[in-house]
Image: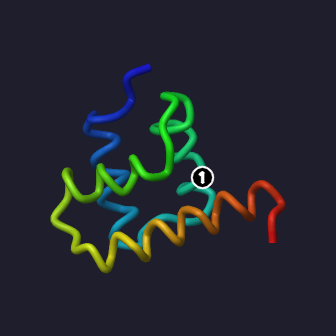
Amino acid sequence: MGYRATEEHKIWLFDLVHGDLKDEDILKGVIKYYVLSGCRVEEIVDDIVYRTNYGLDGVREIKEKVEKVLEEAAGID
């Protein structure tokens, strides 16, 4: 499954860094682009750093948001 590094993935990353995704869309993207490829949350950070022009402070916020969405989906409060 080679969903990463596609135009669709780049658009999802762009929308993620700009806060344009609902929690459901974040979760779907994480599953589609990362979980199904055997990747970890840290690889989302790498993709943001290397595939976008988003600053490091913003990357921390996005990582926290992604982790929050994953924890909520897993029923972890």
At a point 63% along the width and 57% down the height, the residue shown is 24
Furthest residue toward bottom: 57
At a point 56% along the width and 36% down the height, the residue shown is 35
Q: Which residue is mark 1?
A: 27
On screen, residue 5 versus residue 72, left or right, reads: left
| Quadrant assignment, res 45 | bottom left
What amino acid is labelled 1 in the image? Leu
Furthest residue toward top: 1
On screen, residue 57 versus residue 71, left or right, reads: left
Colour scheme shown: rainbow
Residue 1 or 15: which is nearer the viewer? 1
Q: Quick one: SS at disc 1? A: helix
Residue 55, given in percent of the width and then of the height, sits at 22, 74
Quarter of the N terminus within the rendering: top left
At a point 39% along the width and 29% down the height, the residue shown is 3
Furthest residue toward left: 53
Residue 59, given in percent of the width and then of the height, sits at 34, 70
Residue 56, given in percent of the width and then of the height, sits at 26, 73
At a point 75% along the width and 57% down the height, the residue shown is 73
Q: Quick check: 7 above or below 53?
A: above
Residue 63, given in percent of the width and then of the height, sits at 46, 66
Tell me the crowding category of disc 1: few under 14, some 14 to 19, or many 20 or more residues within 10 angstroms, Cα based: some
Residue 30 or 7: which is nearer the viewer? 30
Number of numbered discs = 1
On screen, residue 53 versus residue 64, left or right, reads: left
Quarter of the C terminus within the rendering: bottom right
Residue 28 or 37: which is nearer the viewer? 37
